[in-house]
Image (cartoon, grey):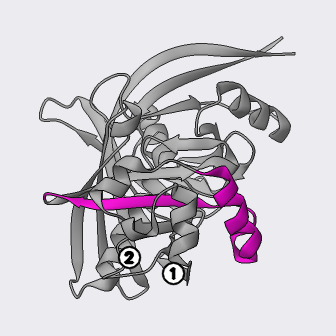
Amino acid sequence: MRTYPFVTVDVFTDRRFGGNQLAVFPDARGLSDAEMQSLAAEFNLSETTFVLPPTDPANTARVRIFHRTAEMPFAGHPNVGTGYVLADRAVDGVLRFEEIAGLVEVRVERDAAGTLTGTTISAPQALTLGGELPVPLAAACAGIDPAGIITARHAPTLAADGGSWRLLVEVTPEAMAAAGPDIAGFRRTVAAHAELGGQLSLYLYRREGAGLRARMFSPLSGTWEDAATGSAATPLAGFLLHLGGEDSSAIDIVQGVEMGRPSLLRAAARRTEGGIRATVGGGCVPVLRGEAMLG
């Protein structure tokens, strides 16, 4: 019998049972690809991470991220949470994770007493914008009236910075409250847009005071609704900077409220010679420890 220790953390929160859940296997040596995928499906969380030795010894680790049905090139809350779990491996407060999408830098955060509180990650790639999707299709996916989508600044737009495409959609407060994923709408949309590769993550946002409120639906990959989506917060921060004229910006995003798992994501973006780069950070709280038993 082979045993593999794991821990779970709640990410983008300062209290247990808030934020987005994550399972982390700090030493995944010996696990096959199929076993990693099976463990991710068994946990049934939005993502599970598996830590392996780095290819380049100058880096901290190789991190593989799986959702319920497939491996991901990059994701936000898995990096924030894995950085928290591996914080004791940091050099000068920095971790460097090798991932399919590229190198992810993680900065460890501590309070004045030196207590670990959370991490901030840099998206591995600059902002990339895809095409726009018609308002009626986006509305159908969200189960809302098309009038609830605000297009004064932009149409529903695909964006990414190392992870999967996220469809960024600004909505009214009423539409945000009423939204819920319509699986038939998602299937019609991916069938009509081959560039989506059969998958679609819908990220709704609205203004709330000086920050934003958000909800994310990705039912075709098994996530009916996500409590906190760091890999949507970074392209959104970058996209909003792209629409404006500033050199840099920072914004707080609240997500997961409708699920009873409120999350706070601190996102920022800046213009560089290589394009718009973004970061996202937040708090983490450990919850569970255990072992997976494999034959």
Q: Please, is residue 139 above or below residue 21 in the view?
A: below
Q: Please, is residue 78 above or below residue 59 in the view?
A: above
The quadrant of the rendering that contains the C terminus is top right
Asked if residue 42 lies left or right of residue 283, the reply is right
Residue 206 % position (x, y): 29, 61
Classify residue 262 by image quadrant.
top left
Residue 272 % position (x, y): 35, 83
Residue 129 tag number: 1
User: In the image, what residue occupies the spot 51% across and 81% down?
Assistant: 129
Assess disc 1: are there few (<14), some (14-19) or many (≥20) residues with their C-alpha within 10 Å of its C-alpha: some
- For this orientation, the residue located farthest to the right is 295
Q: Nearer the viewer, residue 203 or 294?
A: 203
Badge 1 element: strand
Do we see residue 245 in this rendering?
yes
Residue 243 % position (x, y): 31, 84
Q: Please, is residue 147 above or below residue 2 in the view?
A: below
Q: Amino acid at mark 1?
A: Leu
Q: Nearer the viewer, residue 101 or 207?
A: 207
- Which residue has dot 2 on it? 239
Badge 2 element: helix
Label 1 and label 2: CA atoms lie apart by 8 Å
Question: Would residue 207 be counted in the magenta stretch?
Answer: yes
| Range of magenta residues | 182-209
Asked if residue 76 lies left or right of residue 153, the reply is right
Q: Earlier in the sequence, mark 1 or mark 2?
A: 1
Circles 1 and 2 in contact, beta carbons < 8 Å = yes
Q: Amino acid at mark 2?
A: Phe
Residue 145 % position (x, y): 45, 63
Do we see residue 93 in this rendering?
no
